[in-house]
Amino acid sequence: MCEPPLHPNRSHIPGPLAALARWAARRNRLVLAAAALFVLLTGLLSAGVSAHLSSGGWLAENTTAAQVRNRLAQSPHGGMPPLLLLARTTGSVDDPAARTAGTRLAEDLRQVPGVTGVDSYWTGPLTPTTPARTPPSDPLLRAGDGHTALIALWLDATEHVRHDATEHVLAHAARPHRPLEIRAAGEAVVTREFQRHSEQDLLRTELLAMPITLVLLLLIFGSIATAVLPLAIGAVAITGTTAILRALTTATPVSTFALSLTTAVGLALAVDYSLFLVARYREEIAGGCPHPEAVITAVRTAGRTVAASAGVVAISLLGLLLFPVPLMRSLGMAGISVVLLAAAASLLIVPAALACLGERRAGRDFLARRRQAARSAARWHSLASAVMRRPLAVLTLTAALLVLLALPFRDVNLGLSDERVLPADSPVVTATEDLRTGFPQVGTEVDVFLPGWRPASPDDADRLDAYARRLSELPGVQGLRTATGTYLDGKSVGARCDPTAELAASRPCSGVRRFTLPTGTWLALNSAPRPYSAAAAHLLHTIRTQPAPAPALTGGATAELLDTRDVTFQWLPAALAVVVVATLALLLVFTRSLFLPLKALVINSLSLTATFGAMVYVFQQGHLRNLVGAFTVTGTTDLALPFIAFFLAFGLSMDYEILLLARVSEAYNRSRDTARATAEGLQAAAPLFTASAAVVLVVLLALAATDVTDIKIIAVTVALSVLLDAVVIRPLMVPAVIKLAGAANWWLPSVLRRLLPLPSAPEPLGHGSVETTASKPATDASLAT
């Protein structure tokens, strides 16, 4: 049962946060009931959100490659087929039994809802309305050993339709088709396997991490009543953000990554913010402050830290909205939503819960004696004092460590993920490797589109034929198809098609229908190099420099990577400017200092660069694989992963930074002694950010056990960032820099000093603050790990 609401006249502490706390405390039952109702309603509104999320979103919009992809979507056989079936037999694929089974399977698959086109070795191109016929066999769809042939399928571009079609095709292919054995490869199958493994791994992570997290929360908060606060706040932030994402799916693609990161960030911020507030409340109680005033003062002081942290992280995430990449925009929208909801929920639920519980239950801590012993030892105060005795040496060593960790980032090779992010023994991975080995002529497709141009005359057909021959003999091109036929090594394979002849279904050159669209003509090139390699990029550049019958656009996996990378780097300065300006402005208001915000940005940037270096060293280059679990070394780093890691790591590091700066500034306002304030601030803040880091590390290290390499990379990278922040950046580097800066830490031009609001004056013991003396060198942080 809740305690009676706080008496309306018991506390007159000024300020908007105090007023908010006073209102929430007086109406504690209403606030808690409203929070429960909010979770229930948003949970219902967001039900089934996974079915509406996009597994793509990795590619930039409005680029040349995106234009080619959109134009080819108008053709039932446009672009690289997203689903490929390898049909293998012990005999020859030309045996009557194999031909009969392959033909039947291809014709059955074209009737699957969502399948727009089928092309097989035995049937040639088919659509759901193509009449049955017996075309000549296509040599590009037959393996060199004669035992395997391909069935290529094109699917509807709508995400949920494509997903359902993939499931139906795979279920159909799993049936007996003697003498053929069917295996699946292609983008659609890789996406399906990625989602399946991700869901399984996330469930396994929750089952593994949740019991440990609950035990940690109980140890950190010291009672069941307060330990459930982060879970309640996390529920509000996560379900609310999920409902927002569900609404956004009606207007824009939202990535599945956004939902996964919402859960991780929501829980992390809920732990941070509730920890800051409850810790401050117990400090006020320990200082003799009455329970009603302690609740309000905790929100007025620690709540300012919560608001500043949420503001810095949320506004800086606006930079992600500038990138024309759906995945990054999804992360920005999800991040801003979950941060603001977590902060708002903390500032309302925590004072309401503390008022509801009353002083006896809210202040209960079964580890109080152990924490008191830790505070008496003042280990963090002693560490800060030791660092400030030799600040230059400590700063040099820590900076050298971060620079050393960052060095591998110079060799980053950005690419896009492929099937190798899955476990090496996955059937999709082995099928894809067999596809590349048995069908080198299929390889990676490069699409060349000639917008607004069609071979309407014999001269046009000759120009297209010459262009196709020239492209097919380029080094690395292992086959080419277009409206005039099929080409290998600069020569036409089979009879040349005549695009100007009547487009009759009975004609053998059905490629005329496939490669001539109302909006133009296209050519499909199969290249040997992997799509994201330097050789593939060189081949694409060579293709772009060849003279064409009309201005040509290039698409395909390699073009999509290069275009996305170029657009991302084009918008990167603007995004960084938003992050820097927003962070500096808010920290300037929060600290009333020019140096401290600059110091925070520089140190955080150096720390994040160090973790990016570790990402390249471990995952791109393949070092220390035994420490993080098995994965396939690809030699590239997915273009989006540094941004995702930055999103998570930056938010957590700014949380810890603002908490430490708040405690240091508060101590400085009392003593006007920078060294003493730094030691007291670290003694007060370190138990809180180390406790938070412990919870985050448990979740991330459990997530690192995933089978999907991309998720493993994010988990390990952010875990390293959190670890560096908790054991190197805050306790060592920050005190050293503050000591070396001296009075410059608090310098502020007179113009800004007049404009910015003054900090709250220190209050006497028992009325809003905890007095510190030489014998008690730190504010009383009652929650410690």
Image: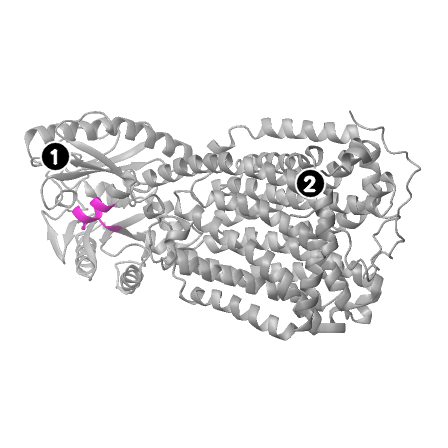
Count of marks, rendered view: 2
Quarter location, residue 686: bottom right
Q: Give x and y (percent) for residue 323.
A: 52, 54
One can see residue 322 in this view = no
Which sits in the foreground, 406 or 223?
A: 223
Q: Give x and y (percent) for residue 639.
A: 43, 55
| Magenta residues (range) | 433-444
Tell me the element at label 1: loop
Question: Residue 136: within the magenta?
Answer: no
State which mark lies toward you, 2 or 1. Answer: 2
Q: Which mark is residue 737?
A: none
10 Å neighbourhood of mark 2: few (<14), some, or many (≥20)? many
- Residue corresponding to mark 1: 89
Q: Give x and y (percent) for residue 461.
A: 18, 53
Question: Residue 434: within the magenta?
Answer: yes
Left/right of residue 317 with respect to residue 168 in the rendered view: right
Quote the CA–CA distance across marks 2 and 1. Answer: 64 Å
Left/right of residue 110 with respect to residue 336 in the rendered view: left
Q: Residue at x 66, y 57 (%)?
A: 657
Q: Which residue is drawn at 52% across and 51% down?
A: 719
Which sits in the foreground, 662 or 325?
A: 662
One can see residue 267 in this view = yes
Which sits in the foreground, 730 or 641?
A: 730
